[in-house]
């Protein structure tokens, strides 16, 4: 929280209302209370009261070393905070993912800087600096590796470090500590440095490590392409996306966490630490919008590796960040879940679902890359898009689990049909653009025409005046807000305008958009509540731009931005009154923020054009 530094006394100014942090009676901070750290291989979450409550090593999808965000008692944490009542302000160092938290007490102030070391060795680094007066600080380092299944790890002094032996033979090496739980007083001008590393000591010079981390992020951010308005929102979203990309392979994870609930106390709790082909394709559009083509190319290289390993015929909808196909879903019964929301899951059973929309999203990504960044499609990418179009041609008549990965019965989802149309449409257009002669072209043209005719006949409800979620249904689905962006239907077509208006009437709560109504959609959870989806709200904003209602689009965008935390981060979902829900920070959300910001800039300038591919809704 940013506070009034001009007040005569921290406690007199009202800062004391944050004394003891923002935790509930069971020790949980809100999802929005966390800052995000990354070394582009792993991630940590740090609360505003100085606790690292989430860290997975050595990869994003590894078992957690600290997981107090999922169990405040058994998950493990590393906290550094004043003993006395305090108030907090925090920020990222400019243009970085380096977090700075300042604690103000009645006797003085201290500054805590947190980062993940950028280098061959992986280390979580923390620097405590006395700013004024004197502040007694408590440090507690309580690692619980492997999601705490083996209980606490004893940190024993050895050669000046604290060493924790792990059941799998690894070691945690803590530096700068006298013991795993201690108090010390920080006076003005004092600097105390701490690090925790895996198997070998962290960097010996933390000042140099901090400079290195700051320089890495600032150099990456310095040439970002930003809109005139909302530049800060776009920069923070871009830095979050960069932090979610696994540097060794180029894969992009959907979010940094697992099992943060879509409703407090609910069971819609999933592991998002994998790379969905659909999500990463959207990310290409966002990286392209901000001018980061190297990151887009890295993901395409990862896709090439996946397609070579699996083959298009066996392509899954998601993979591990190293290309792993087996993502078995397990329940961790020993963890109570965030704010007692069970179950806690690792792995994701949706990896084996049929989601035929993925063919179109991948084809559209290849179309985006060819039309924006390349002079001609490579033979490999032609073979890939050809195979995607053929799979769409074979499978478009079949039901699937759809973009929302429902765990009810498969259905004939309108969005899935339209994305099969996209797969064939992009293959046809690329063949015509680059002169590829192919015997499949007549079949794709026929298939494309058949899909469009069927969707218009069976996926549009005349009485509702809108496209429906699936054939034979009268339910609405926010994914249909993308239909004009794909080129499937014109933005000024009354059927698309009717879909936008019906979404505003029927799927909106508190100015935010549900993906669908849980009480009339068989998604396998019997109507269990969930939050509104941030990406759906921003899809609505972009659709409003397309139909010329720019004021409505801007109002939606501003409302979503207002619900971001003080650092500019957002989770997957929001309650109607703005509480963040779901995994965090979420790629889908920050992608949509980037695309929407650029869409609004173009609309206010009188030009509405594509930022990315069909997912930008501004084609």
Image (tube, rainbow, N blue to C red):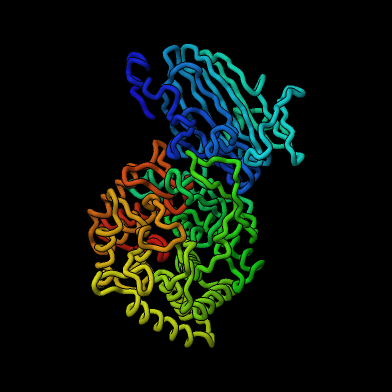
Which image quadrant: the N terminus? top left
Q: Position of residue 128 (x, y in %)?
A: 54, 23
Residue at left offset 48%, top offset 77% = 398
Task: Check the image and report above or below for 546 versus 248.
Answer: below
Task: Check the image and report above or below for 133 versus 175.
Answer: above
Task: Check the image and report above or below for 22 versus 305.
Answer: above
Q: Nearer the viewer, residue 3 or 224?
A: 3
Q: Nearer the viewer, residue 113 or 96?
A: 113
Residue at left offset 54%, top offset 52% = 253
* In-image side of 80 versus 525 (left or right): right
The part of the image, by quadrant, that contains residue 565 is: top left
Q: Position of residue 78 (x, y in %)?
A: 58, 29
* In-image side of 53 versus 468 (left or right): right
Residue at left offset 52%, top offset 14% = 136
Is residue 366 shown to the viewer in this render?
no
Which image quadrant: the C terminus? bottom left
Q: Nearer the viewer, residue 299 or 355?
A: 355
Q: Position of residue 171 (x, y in %)?
A: 73, 35
Q: Position of residue 285 (x, y in %)?
A: 45, 59
* In-image side of 347 versus 290 (left or right): right
């Amino acid at each position: 929280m940013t506070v009034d530094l001009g007040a005569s006394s921290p406690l007199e100014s009202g800062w004391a209302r944050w004394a003891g942090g923002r935790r509930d009676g069971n020790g949980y901070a809100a999802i929005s209370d966390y800052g995000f750290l990354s070394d582009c291989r792993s991630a940590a979450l740090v609360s505003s009261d100085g606790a690292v409550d989430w860290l997975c090593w050595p990869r994003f999808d590894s078992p957690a070393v600290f997981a107090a965000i999922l169990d405040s008692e058994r998950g493990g944490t590393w906290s550094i905070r004043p003993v006395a009542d305090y108030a907090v302000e925090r920020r990222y160092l400019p243009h970085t993912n380096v977090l700075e938290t300042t604690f103000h007490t009645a006797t003085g102030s201290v500054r805590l800087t947190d980062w993940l070391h950028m280098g061959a060795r992986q280390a979580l680094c923390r620097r405590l600096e006395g700013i004024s007066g004197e502040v007694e600080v408590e440090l507690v380092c309580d690692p619980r590796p492997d999601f705490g299944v083996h209980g606490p790890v004893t940190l024993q002094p050895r050669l000046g470090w604290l060493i924790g032996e792990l059941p799998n033979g690894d070691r945690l090496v803590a530096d700068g500590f006298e013991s795993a739980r201690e108090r010390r007083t920080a006076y003005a001008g004092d600097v105390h440095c701490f690090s925790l590393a895996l198997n070998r000591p962290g960097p010996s010079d933390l000042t140099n490590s901090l400079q290195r981390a700051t320089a890495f992020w600032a150099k990456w951010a310095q040439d970002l392409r930003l809109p005139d308005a909302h530049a800060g929102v776009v920069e923070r979203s871009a830095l979050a996306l960069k932090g979610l990309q696994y540097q060794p392979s180029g894969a992009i994870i959907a979010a940094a966490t697992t099992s943060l609930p879509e409703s407090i106390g609910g069971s819609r709790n999933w592991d998002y630490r994998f790379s969905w082909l659909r999500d990463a394709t959207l990310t290409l559009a966002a990286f392209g919008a901000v001018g980061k083509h190297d990151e887009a190319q890295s993901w395409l290289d990862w896709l090439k590796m996946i397609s070579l390993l699996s083959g298009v015929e066996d392509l899954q909808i998601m993979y591990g960040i190293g290309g792993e196909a087996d993502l078995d879903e397990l329940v961790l019964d020993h963890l109570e879940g965030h704010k007692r929301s069970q179950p806690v899951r690792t792995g994701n059973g949706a990896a084996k679902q049929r989601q035929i929309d993925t063919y179109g999203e991948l084809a559209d990504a290849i179309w985006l890359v060819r039309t924006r960044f390349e002079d001609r499609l490579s033979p490999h990418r032609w073979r890939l898009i050809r195979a995607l179009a053929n799979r769409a041609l074979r499978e478009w008549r079949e039901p699937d689990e759809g973009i929302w990965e429902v765990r009810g019965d498969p259905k004939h989802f309108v969005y899935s049909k339209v994305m099969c149309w996209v797969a064939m449409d992009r293959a046809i257009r690329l063949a015509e653009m680059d002169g590829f002669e192919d015997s499949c072209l007549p079949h794709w043209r026929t298939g494309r025409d058949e899909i469009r005719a069927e969707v218009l006949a069976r996926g549009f409800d005349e009485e509702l005046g809108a496209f429906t979620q699936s054939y034979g249904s009268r339910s609405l689905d926010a994914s249909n807000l993308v239909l004009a962006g794909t080129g499937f239907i014109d933005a000024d077509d009354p059927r698309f305008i009717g879909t936008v208006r019906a979404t505003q009437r029927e799927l909106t709560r508190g100015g935010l958009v549900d993906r669908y109504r849980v009480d009339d959609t068989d998604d396998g959870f019997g109507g269990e509540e969930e939050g509104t989806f941030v990406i759906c709200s921003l899809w609505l904003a972009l659709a409003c731009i397309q139909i010329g209602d720019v004021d409505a689009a801007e109002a939606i965008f501003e409302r979503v931005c207002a619900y971001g935390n003080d650092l500019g981060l957002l989770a997957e979902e929001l309650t109607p009154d703005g509480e963040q829900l779901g995994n965090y920070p979420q790629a889908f959300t920050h992608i949509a923020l980037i695309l929407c910001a650029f869409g609004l800039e173009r609309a206010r300038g009188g030009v509405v054009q594509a930022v990315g591919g069909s997912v930008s809704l501004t084609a």
